[in-house]
Amino acid sequence: MAEDKEDNVKTSIGKRASVLVFLLFFGLAGSIPAYGQDGKYALYELGTLGGPNTYAYDINDAGQIVGVGDTTLYREGWVWQAFSGTKEGISALFPGEEARSSANAINNDGTIVGNKGGKAFMFGGGSSFVELGVLPGAGASSGLSINSGKKVVGYSWNEGVWERGALWENASSGNDIGTLGGIYTRATSVNNLDQVAGYSQNEGGSNRAFRWKKVLGTEPLTDLGVLDGFTDSFGLRINNKGTVVGYSQKYDIYWNETNLACLWGENGIQELQKNVLRVSETVLQSQAFGINDAGVVVGTHLVGTEYRAFIWDSDNKMRDLNSLLPENSGFLLVVAYAINNKGEIVGYGYKTGSTDATAFVLVPPETKDPIVGPFPVDIDIRPWNSQNKVNLWARWGLIPVAILSDADFNALKEVDRQSLTFGRTGDEDSLAFCMPWKWDVNRDRKKDLICYFHEKATGFKCGDTVGTLKGKTKALKAEPFEAQDQVEIIPCPPPRKHHRGK
């Protein structure tokens, strides 16, 4: 549903589009030719589906786009090949049906997830339509994100009484991922390593961004924290590096709302608007909605009295995307929702003199080949032992890690063993040796690879709960892969050194 994205904004920008929540759409429309000049983005307006408004929510590396629009009768999800060269028209995902629906995300296989008739669905990419169902006790659900393994996350709710984050695996019934101690959770994004991001209410009643990955199914959500001086935070997108973007939020004594776009990475939380001129604290507003694997972030920020789409990267910091359009484009970019690994951006804006929302695609001056992220594999730290303890103070400790084979991946034959690294971040050079024998660790009749790593070289610290393994397949492909499993660091705090008295 349109509210799936609009609810995440939680600011005045959502008020202008709130009337769309109850609309449905259908029909066909062609894209308007791109505007582009040297050094500037080319702008494609995607048109409408018969009604006045359209919103583009996601784009995959093939340039396929999904979103929502409206007509005079109803709203439908849609997918559009933005710049394939064929200039195909926008069309309804479910033409002729009057059930409300929204297409919220699409993976690189072209599989779409969203909401139709109040239920989460998965459709396309060679798959037939699948209704994903609801959590026990709930009456409705919505799919917000899908990864390359077709794992879907979103949320399920019961007439607004409660809302819980959901994970659907293999198109099965959803799993409740839990909360941070409060009554609701929303899972907004899942990456190709099966890491999930979102936000949840904690015991004190505040919203907090979280990161989570299912291993045994009982793992707690990790509270990512807030910017200094703020009370709430919202995680909206996670890339294949595990970096989460979203925003922190606070209210003053008059209930004036302030939102600041932020990023949670290896070095903790980072404010993205930090070096932007602040007119006053009450008008400082920004929210980050999308991030690609290069760490480029897109979203919206308040400039004067109007919201404008922004782009952020570590070198150039936050920039108004409108400044990167050709002059006199006749279009105001309002919100950028997503950016793919080619740097193509989708969202919505307004034509000059109009208040109708129009979906857009931005194509960068030089469209590069997509960044190829690591593909996920499964590992078992300390196989045959459910307690994955790591003793950092063991003098000669070794940690066995089983790299598990499956139908599409033969760990024994495909892994370049010398490429393996393992530890706190996955970049630690800690490999000791790999076993020459064949083992079926998880009893699936497939032989797995077991390697040992030096405990002292893994870089773990007290409080760490996840170990990461990285590696590559053998040449010629040399494809990177990555995996994670739970760990428990012992003893924590470290033992004190005792000295003899004089």
Image (cartoon, rainbow, N blue to C red):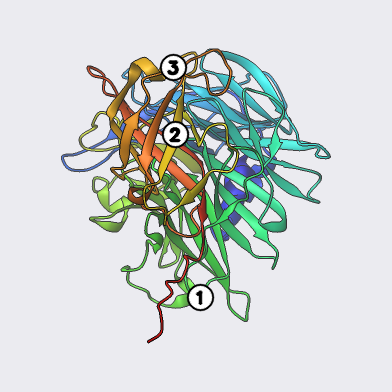
Pinpoint residue 3: horizontal percent, then vertical percent.
63, 45
Q: Viewer-proximal residue, 2 or 473?
A: 473
Q: Which mark is nearer the camera, 2 or 3? A: 3
Which quadrant, please, contains the C terminus? Answer: bottom left
Query: Residue at 58% across / 78% down in the picture?
Result: 252
Q: Viewer-proximal residue, 237 or 308?
A: 237
Q: Which picture quadrant has residue 44?
A: top left
Whichever of labels 2 and 1 marks the residue nearer the N terminus, that label is 1
- Tag 1's secondary structure? loop
In space, the residues marked 2 and 3 are separated at their CA atoms by 14 Å
Pinpoint residue 77: horizontal percent, then vertical percent.
59, 29
Neighbor class of circle 3 (other Cα within 10 Å; few <14, some 14-19, many 20+) is few
Kind of residue at disc 3: Lys
Pinpoint residue 441: horizontal percent, then vertical percent.
53, 23
Where is mark 3, residue-wise? 438
Q: Which mark is nearer the camera, 2 or 1? A: 2
Where is mark 1, residue-wise? 229
Neighbor class of circle 2 (other Cα within 10 Å; few <14, some 14-19, many 20+) is many
With 470 as the anchor, is 488 left or right in this view?
right
Where is mark 2, residue-wise? 401
Q: Which picture quadrant has residue 438?
A: top left
Kind of residue at disc 1: Gly
Q: Which mark is nearer the camera, 1 or 3? A: 3
In space, the residues marked 1 and 3 are separated at their CA atoms by 54 Å
Outermost residue toward the bottom in this view: 502
